[in-house]
Image (cartoon, rainbow, N blue to C red):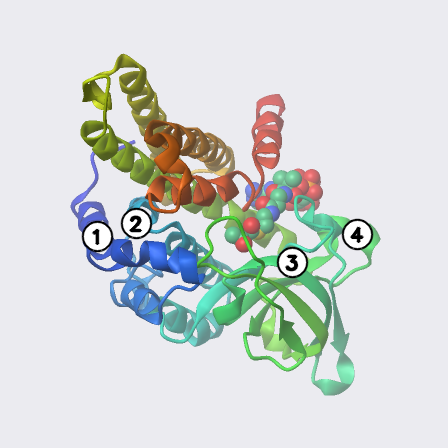
Amino acid sequence: MQLSPSETQTLVQRTAREFAERVVRPLAADIDAKAKIPDAVVRGLGELGLLAVNVSPDVGGAGAGAVAYALAVQEIARACASSAVTMSVTNMVGEAITHFGTPAQARHYVSDLARGDAGLGCFALSEAEAGSDPGAMTTTARRDGSHGGEWVLDGAKQWISGGSAARVFIVWARTRPIEAASKGISCFLVDGNAAGLRVGRPEDKMGIRGSSTVPLEFSGCRVPASAMLGSENEGFKIAMMALDGGRIGISSQAIGIARAALDESVRYAKDRRTFGAPIAEHQAIQWKLADMQTRIEAAHLLSMRAAWMKETGHAFSREAAIAKLFASESAIAVCNDAVQIHGGYGYTRDFAAERHLRDARVTTIYEGTSEIQRLVIARSALA
Ligand code: CAA
């Protein structure tokens, strides 16, 4: 594994950092307070190629690879976790459509997603009672032979990130009875404004408040035969492979949030004085800062390894699960320390440390809980 980034990776990282510092960071508190990401942020991400970093330029992507993508998500997350997850999920959807879709599907959807001016890419897998166990989903897709093989979707999805501003949803639905479990699921591309699709009210969340999280209802929602992504009944594997990549995105998001918490803590510790000295001079604080830095660096290396394995065509499910597990749990520990270093001020909305802790909390939950990552890692150890 190459430890120093290539010229392209450095360029993408610098571009993301510059945009994050100049445009995103100044808006981050407001994005959290108003629970909305301004269109200019999504458009800006699109203009810089950050919504399709690892997607081929043939369909409008930057073609910069999985490592560059992971570095870029970190930079955006360091400024605003809501913007980073928006970026991450749209990249994941664009990659899945390019990888598993037909050239016509990729042309139709991916360049819109890459530009960022037509809406986001959303991943509609989870249901109210099928989150960790998507093989238990009950949303159905029935073929209507009398209408040229159209598919009719019925059911409900839950916890859909970015769903309020979707250009396209990748929707998983049963095409065989429930007994077929993961072997009876197919995958469809559904436009955000499709008839028969109702996008529900965004959840009132603890963190990543700028990124909407919505329920979806499908009621006789018709899509053409050409809307199927990949092969019939092979949808579960598409979900798993897309999630492997998505987990690199969430580990990068967690690292970015943790870096922001460390930045704030260092600044505060140099400024705030107790017992006649800046608290940065007290060993109790220095040890916390050292532990925070160490966790971040270890998470970064794990995340880079997973991204490098993906980029170089190796199997990377286990490495992505390890990176996501460690980075997300580390982010919560780091952000918790950041609040502690800030003392009472860290518990107020006047300091960003409080937002970082709220934003970090979801990273052990979505795109596979820590328990699911442990299951994936343990299965691989026992295989
Ligand atoms: N890549 C390719 N294929 C895979 C795979 C992978 N990573 N993981 C499993 N498969 C294949 C298996 O090989 C198997 O294939 P065969 O039927 O041909 O043998 C098939 O898929 C079924 O596999 P399992 O028997 O292992 O399936 P399982 O039901 O036991 O589940 C699991 C495995 C890892 C627990 C999986 O269900 C899982 O990852 N659950 C978590 C789901 C998740 O992450 N949800 C998050 C929601 S999305 C989200 O959060 C996005 C967002 O909004 C931000």
Q: Which label lies toward us, 3 or 4?
A: 3
- The residue tagged 2 is 79
| Disc 2, SS | helix
Instruction: Indicate which disc, 3 or 2, sits on the residue closer to the N terminus.
Output: 2
User: Are dots 2 and 1 in contact, CB under 8 Å?
Assistant: yes
Three-letter amino acid code of the residue under disc 1: Glu
Give the Cα separation between the discs numbered 2 and 1: 7 Å
| Disc 4, SS | helix
Q: 244 or 369, which lies in front?
A: 369
Q: Which label lies toward us, 4 or 2?
A: 2
* Residue behind label 4 places its C-beta within 8 angstroms of ligand 1: no
Q: Where, quadrant-wise, is the C terminus in this rendering?
A: top right
Q: Position of residue 214 (x, y in %)?
A: 59, 62
User: Are dots 3 and 1 in contact, CB under 8 Å?
Assistant: no
Instruction: Indicate which disc, 2 or 1, sits on the residue closer to the N terminus.
Output: 1
**Crowd class of label 1 (few under 14; some 14 to 19; many from 20; radius 10 Å):** some
